[in-house]
Amino acid sequence: MNGYNHADYAWSLQKFGAPRELHHCGGWVLERDTPGGDYKDAMGLYPFFVCEDWAKLSKDLEAMSEDTVCVSLVTDPFGDFNPSLLEDNFKDVFKPFKQHYIVDLNVPMEEIGGKRRRKHARKALNKLEMDVVEEPVTRIDDWLDVYDVLIKKHDIKGIRSFSRDAFLQQFQIPGTVMIRALYQGKTVGAQIYLIQGDVVHAHLGACTQEGYDLDATYALDYYSFQHFRGEARWVDLGGGVGVSADGGDGLSQYKSWWATNTKQTYFCGRIFDYDKYNELVLSRNTPTTQYFPAYRFGEFN
């Protein structure tokens, strides 16, 4: 189990819930105290739930029903599951969520991204030095410097902000790679990748303002497609910003320019104890909402 399904990845998120291993399907969730602290609920790991055997997830859900109010998760875009069978396990909420933008590394480089994007990337690559860091923990300070720029620029809080300790754990997971963009010897951009089977997940990326001015994002993406070619089949660029599934944000548009394919993810929710769930909704004076669980409305705003 590598990447998002490695135990160290689950434990890197322990600030936001207690990692619980699902022994039947081979996945992880985070158990959290509900508001008020009387009960427990569970959520899949950020940014999506990965497991070894989706057909056995129902057994783990049955075990969770004994001590958990509800569970919610977003499916792995490369998950090997039958949507209709998964819907049977999540009768309360099952709906399409974000599209993930995928690059097929079997596609020739001159067919990826369009002429304008490739031109931007090549121009940037002529100015920048690229460095592949197979042991990202050795460059954690460089990463934290550029990621802090992203956090401040977009006012990122909560689980997406991570922490130094979280990154220390993640950077030691087998198959984690950092690619840096340097200008005059200084890191101006970096991407973190998690390799899982034949998929390379673009976990996180960030640039300094100088990096943005130099189009380091274009350089990092285009260079990564070349670097991972022959090592994996797919690069998962991820989805858009926030909890919206409409793909109308700027990040979605940027990723769509590179993508050769898309993969659908699904948001899944199941209530195990309706009495406790409704009690929590009433106690929070929750407005009418499509958010699940409703009593946590606004938690990622």
Image (cartoon, rainbow, N blue to C red):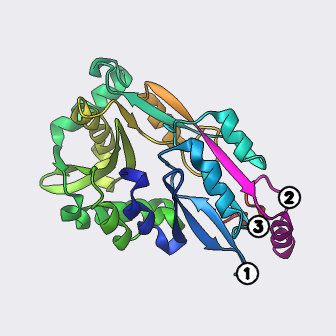
Q: From the image, tell me which residue sits under label 2.
A: 288
Which residue bears the numbered disc 1?
A: 38
Using the image, determine if residue 173 lies above or below residue 52.
below
The residue lying toward the viewer, choosing from 68 and 293, is: 68
Q: On the rendered structure, is 56 left or right of 154?
A: right
* Vertical order, 175 against 86 (above or below): below
Percent of width and height locating residue 54: 56, 43
Picture coordinates of residue 238, whole percent (x, y): 47, 42
- In front of the other: 96 or 222: 96
| Displayed quadrant of residue 122 | top left
Q: Position of residue 267 (x, y in %)?
A: 65, 46
Look at the image and tell me in which quarter the C terminus lies: bottom right
Q: Going 51% across and 58% down the picture, which residue do you hit?
A: 23
Q: Is residue 156 visible?
A: no
Residue at 44%, 32% in the rendered image: 102
* Mark drawn on residue 295: 3
